Amino acid sequence: MSDLIIRNCNLGNSDSKDIFIKNGLIEDITNNIPKIGCPEIDAKNYFVTSPFVDSHFHMDATLSYGLPRVNQSGTLLEGIQLWGELKPTLTKDAIKNRARKLCKWAIARGTLIIRSHVDVSGDNLLAVEALLEIKDEMKDYIELQLVAFPQDGLLRSNCHKNLIKSLDMGVDVVGGIPHFERTMVEGSESIKILCELAEKRNLLVDMHCDESDDPNSRHIETLTLHTNRLNMKGRVAGSHLTSMHSMDNYYFSKLIGLMVEAEMNVIPNPLINITIQGKHDTYPKRRGMTRVPEQIKAGLNVAFGHDCVMDPWYPLGSHDMLEVAHMALHVAQMTGVNEMISCFDSVTTTAAKVLHIEKYGLKKGSYGDLVILQCKNKIEALRLKPTRIFVVKKGKVISSSNPTEYKLQLNSKPEYTDLIF
Ligand SMILES: [Zn+2]
């Protein structure tokens, strides 16, 4: 918990403010805060934002690309099979080393909150132990919210006991994967069991739900049913929801109403959805991302997740939430001004709402967490994915970088550009 004054902050509009962080909390945002002898930094009128929030990630699998072999087909199912081959060989130290490295990459990119699913469907809970230890080790720098995720299916892999044990150990959120159960009936049954478990323990729910191209998958509907029945409005998130891309427009018009009634939170994963879905198509190929503009228009909170970085499902990435929002914007054709702004919010403020994060945002009383980007506003941030000049956590600078500048030598005299419009 530190004190810090940040001078000349551009908050996305024209006037420049100073931000005073006292004991780790934002004390004031105003003009010309007097010097009080605490550390100061100069934002130089660059854009200051709340930190990025990754609403959906798999930290137990991250940075395992190529172990024990690469995903040749690039499909979701080969990825799950590959993860099954890797799991028996995992050690706690190896999981922790990779997760720690990923956390450092995320911090450097200005992401200070990550919701990570953790597989509870194996013989042991090694990954749960490893990620709980990393959560504690990194808590002063990055907040990890863990989801008990029955990767191989709650009923299909009979992992109910493991899932409950992981919650007893301190995992925060109840996960699920109904479309991976053997039948639609068992998928529905798994949703019922998991929602009741979450309600009994007063926990949030976040299920991988209908991550398929099957227009007839109906688990989102079932998730809204149990959300309403158990009075869990606003406390349940559906991750992926890719089936909505392919479903009939008439059915969609019914389903979106049910989602609004349940105040369901939506977590698409654009980088993964665009590369994994539509693999069985010839041409035209479906994009496979859920219907983001329509969901936002209906008033739902939509938060984007990174999902994967260099793991059995995705060979790329460096944990940059601006890359995620940039992809979402393109896939959903959201180039309207307000649409672009909402894409930025889906990796910051809206995501914090979806994850029920307290004291988030650039306002008095919130945690002194922020990122200074080498750009002027949200839209430019999406365009440039710029250098994160300072990353501040509770009033302490935890990452910094020099602004990027390119030296051009076109004539005898060098000139410089930073790509800012
Ligand atoms: Zn996932």
Image (tube, rainbow, N blue to C red):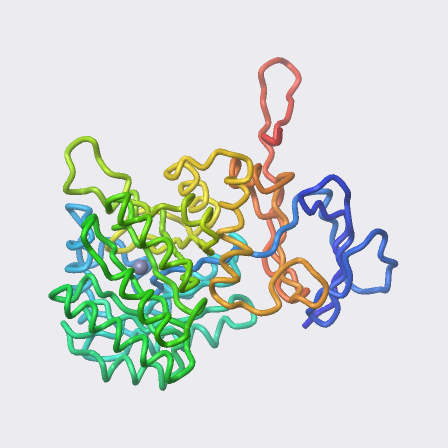
* Residue 345 percent location from the top left of the image: 53, 50
Looking at the picture, does residue 246 appear above or below residue 29?
above
Location of the N terminus (image quadrant): bottom right
On-image quarter of the C terminus? top right
Image-quadrant location for residue 265:
bottom left
Furthest residue toward right: 34
Q: Quick check: can you spot residue 94?
A: no
In depth, the one of 369 and 205 nearer the eye is 205
Q: Which residue sits at x=20%, y=56%?
A: 217
In the image, is 81 to the left or to the right of 275? Answer: left
Left or right: 251 with respect to 142?
left
**Farthest residue, direction top:** 411
Regarding residue 210, the answer to whether it shows in the image is yes
Task: Please state which of residues 337 and 54 is positioned toward the viewer in this rendering.
Answer: 337
The percent position of residue 392, horizontal first and vertical second, equals: 63, 59
Residue at the image position 27 percent from the left and 65 percent from the top: 222
Q: Is residue 269 above or below residue 179?
A: above
102 vs 198, nearest the viewer: 198
* Ligand 1 quarter of the rendering: bottom left
Residue 232 image-quadrant placement: bottom left
The location of residue 363, given as percent across then percent down, is 69, 60
Residue that sits furthest to the left in the current view: 182
Determine whether 92 is above or below 392 in the image: below
Identity of the residue drawn at 70% across and 69% down: 2
In the rendered picture of this protein, how many numbered marks are placed on residues?
A: 0
